[in-house]
Image: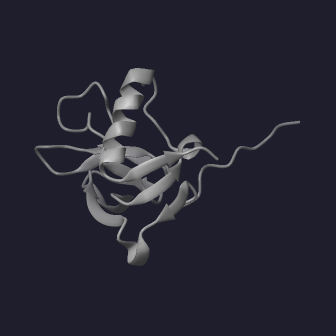
């Protein structure tokens, strides 16, 4: 018997957010990405485009800048999407972190999110 695992649904990781969508921001995304809701994202300094957090980078994406609200696929030209940018509580176990992230790197990113008033909660 096989068990099918479902991905996280749009906004499923949210516990609460600010009124009137104040927590959300429409932002540009880098080209050629496939991301699931709950992906922790960073912002490239040179282009202003968002992409998955990369703690080993030095282009701005090493700093957590929000959490992807809905799944996103971009083509060669990139595209816009919505992130949780501020004032929210999220379920820590439903967030998507980069493969190989260390405990220290994750703790740093959690602190960066807290600086945006995005607080991680246990289920």
- Residue 67: horizontal and vertical position, in percent? 40, 51
Q: What residue is rendered at 71% in x and 44% in y? A: 5
Above or below — where is 1 with respect to 113? above
Front-lying residue, 40 or 31 = 40
Above or below — where is 68 with respect to 19? above
Q: What residue is rendered at 32% in x and 32% in y? A: 54
Q: Is residue 30 left or right of residue 81?
A: left
Q: What residue is rendered at 49% in x and 46% in y? A: 120
- Residue 2: horizontal and vertical position, in percent? 83, 37
Q: What residue is rendered at 24% in x and 55% in y? A: 77
Q: Quadrant of the N terminus?
A: top right
Above or below — where is 36 with respect to 69? above
Q: Is residue 77 left or right of residue 4?
A: left
Q: Quadrant of residue 53?
A: top left
Q: Is residue 61 left or right of residue 95?
A: left
Asked if residue 32 shows in the view, the reply is: no
């Amino acid at each position: 018997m096989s068990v099918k695992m479902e991905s996280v649904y749009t906004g499923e990781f949210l516990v609460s957010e600010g009124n009137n969508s104040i927590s959300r921001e429409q932002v540009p995304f880098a080209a050629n990405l496939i991301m699931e809701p709950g992906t922790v994202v960073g912002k490239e300094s040179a282009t202003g485009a968002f992409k998955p957090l990369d703690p080993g980078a030095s282009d701005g994406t090493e700093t957590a800048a929000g959490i992807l609200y809905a799944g996103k696929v971009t083509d060669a030209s990139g595209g816009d999407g919505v992130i949780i940018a501020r004032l929210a509580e999220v379920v820590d176990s439903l967030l998507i972190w980069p493969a190989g992230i260390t405990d220290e790197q994750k703790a740093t990113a959690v602190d960066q999110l807290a600086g945006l008033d995005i607080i991680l909660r246990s289920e």
